[in-house]
Image (cartoon, grey):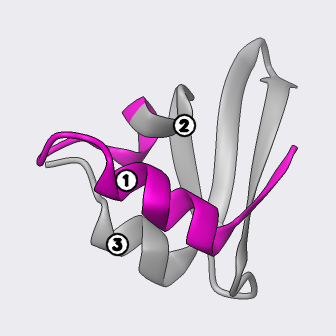
Amino acid sequence: MRLKRDEVERMMGERPGGTSLEEALEVFEVFASSTLADEVYVLDDVSGKRIAIAPAALRAKYRKE
């Protein structure tokens, strides 16, 4: 599944402060990609887990503490 960055930013804005990108996307982990700019890819079954690949800047902005 592909999500536009604007859609993900809107989704994060609707969540309570401190919500991680992982929680909002309902994935095990979000990996950063320096080549992606405006889309987030959600992969349903990577070694039995749901993961996402997001632009590095977006990942850094919503990094889990």
Please tell me whether residue 16 belongs to the stretch shown in magenta: yes
Disc 2 to disc 1: CB gap under 8 Å: no
The circle on residue 25 is 2
Badge 2: residue crowd in 10 Å (few <14, some 14–19, many ≥20): some
Looking at the picture, how far across and down is residue 51, in whole percent? Answer: 66, 35
Instruction: Name the side, left or right, on which 50 lies relative to 41.
Output: left
Determine which quarter of the picture holds residue 32: bottom right
Which region is colored magenta? 1-23
SS of the residue at dot 3?
Answer: helix
The three-letter code of the residue at mark 2 reads Leu
Looking at the picture, how far across and down is residue 56, in whole percent? Answer: 52, 78
The three-letter code of the residue at mark 1 reads Met
- If you read the primary sequence from the N terminus, does the residue marked by circle 2 or circle 1 appear first? 1
Q: Vertical placement of 48 versus 56: above or below?
A: above
Name which residue lies at 46% across and 50% down.
11
- The N terminus sits in image quarter: top right
SS of the residue at dot 1?
Answer: helix
Circle 1 is placed at which residue position? 12
